[in-house]
Each structure stands twice: as structure tokens, then as C-alpha cells.
Amino acid sequence: MTRRSWLKDSPVAAVLLPIVGLAGAIGLWWLATVVFSIDSYLLPSPKDVVAKFGEQPSYLLTETGTSFLETIEGFLLAIVIGVPIAIVIVRSVLLERLVYPLLLMVNAIPKIAIAPLLVVWWGFGQWPKVFMVLLVCFFPIVISTAQGMKSTPVELVELLRSLNASRAQEFFKLRLRYAMPQIFTGLKVAISLAVIGSVIAEFVGATHGLGYVISQSGASADTSLAFAAITLLSIMSIVLFYALVLLEHLLLPWAQESR
């Protein structure tokens, strides 16, 4: 096995290399705080962040659970709404030309500008955060699904129709199958944005969540607590992303082989 094929196909490399990269980044972080003698209130060392987590583990884990729940709910809601809309857009040129400009307009709006309005409309509960996650996830899911549906080769569609396949068979056996790799690409982009969306909403109007923790710790200059919350957000984003990667490998082994 060549080095390139080992890096590409070995499960050991798939696990070991990210760990090495993460360890290297943490080492550079620690080295920067030592070499430049940076005060801990400006940039805490990795040791300070671990110590802060050790001081308040239950509090930080509870707030992580709040942000995680908001992220998952908004992400799933974006899938439930976005995928059917993408399918309808693909099946109708008229609807595509009507809806696409609206989608672009909504996507172009800075989400931080909407967050205060969500608090006015729905208060400080969970729904403003879920809706913010929905907003940031919606566009990549719709676009990737629509483009995946359009990428189906015309000759295969004609072949299936020549065999008297029904519309449902054409959709589920051909178009959806061809679209799945691009749909998962959109989902992987969206899940990273989902974490960002939940934090944006928690910055503006929240009493719980890691975004709220970061906002409050910044106000009190407790940068170690802020970095602990940021670290947990990063871990949550990585776990969710690789959960989708694993799901893609399990559901679409044929797509991996074709690549």
C-alpha cells in the first residue's frame, strides 16, 4: 500500500491524523502564551481552560445540552422544510423562477440583524434560537438538494421512462439516489452553520446556552470561561459533522466507491 492510499483508505489514518492536527494546534496555542507572556485574562492557556471546566463541569455541560438541542431541532426542521421545497422547485420552472429570488433575498439578510426581532416576536424562549438555526441551514439544504436533483443524467431518465416506470419510481429509484451525495454535502455545510446560528441567537436574547455563557463571561472578563464554552462549541460542531459523515458512509457506500 502506497503512502497516499494509506492516508486515503486507512481507518487508523482517518482517526490518528485529526488527533495529531488537534494536538499540534493546542501545542501552538500553549507555546504562544508562553513565548509572548500573554496575560491569562487576554488569552488563557489550555491549562487555564481545562481548569475552568473542572471548576464548573455541570454548568457548562448543561448549557452545552441547551445549545445542542436548539441546533438539532433547527437543523431537522430545515431538512423537513427545505428538501420538499427543493423538490417542488425542480419539478416546476415557474416555481423555480418565483421562489429562487426570494431564497437569495432571505439568505442575503445578515442573520444577526434578525435575532433581536425574533426576541420581540417570541420572547427569550427556545423558539427564537431554533428559528435562527433554521434560517442559516435552510439555503444550503435547498440549493444542494435542487442541484442534486438536476444532476440526474437525461439518458437514464429516458431509459427508466422507456421501461414504463412511474413518476414515483423515477423519483425514488433514480433522481433521489443521484441527488443523495450532493444533499449530504449541503447537510454537512448546514450542520456547521447550525451551531453558529444557535450561538448568534443566544448572544442577542437568551438566559441559557453556550452563546449566553460566552456573552456573560466576556462582560465579566472571564476569558477562561469563554474559551471553555468556545471549546465545547467546537467539539459539538466536530461531533455533529462527523456523525453526518458516518451516516453518509453507511447509507451511500456506492457513492464512496464511485469516487
Image (cartoon, rainbow, N blue to C red):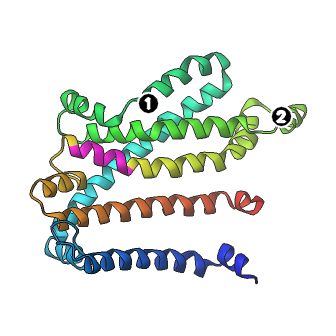
The residue shown at (12%, 60%) is 221
Camera-nearest residue between 233 and 77: 233
Contact between marks 2 and 1 (CB within 8 A): the answer is no
Question: For the residue labelled by badge 1, is the local secondary structure a helix, a strand or a loop?
Answer: helix
- In the rendering, at what x and y percent does residue 143 appear? 58, 36
Which portion, as a residue range, is magenta? 195-203
Quadrant of the image containing the N terminus: bottom right
For the residue pair 15 and 86, the one nearer the viewer reads as 15
Closer to viewer: mark 2 or mark 1: 1
- Whole-percent x, y for residue 162 in the image: 90, 32
Asked if the stretch drawn in magenta spans residue 200, the answer is yes
- Tag 2's secondary structure? helix
The furthest residue to the front: 36
> Is 254 rendered above or below residue 96?
below
Identify the amino acid type marked 2: Val
Residue located beneath label 1 in the image: 108
Q: Quadrant of the image for the C terminus?
A: bottom right
Dot placed on the residue nearer the N-terminal end, 2 or 1: 1
| Residue drawn at x 65%, y 50% as measured from the top left | 181
The answer to if 28 sits in the magenta stretch is no
**Residue 80 in view:** yes
Quadrant for residue 148, please give it. top right
Residue 159 position by quadrant: top right
Q: Position of residue 240 (x, y in %)?
A: 44, 59
Residue 154's tag is 2
Residue 257 percent across, percent down from the top left: 75, 63
Residue 161: which quarter of the image? top right
The CA distance from mark 2 to mark 1 is 33 Å
Q: Residue at x 74, y 30 (%)?
A: 167
Q: Would residue 195 be found to the left or right of residue 153 on screen?
A: left
The amino acid marked with disc number 1 is: Ala
Q: Main secondary structure of the magenta part?
A: helix
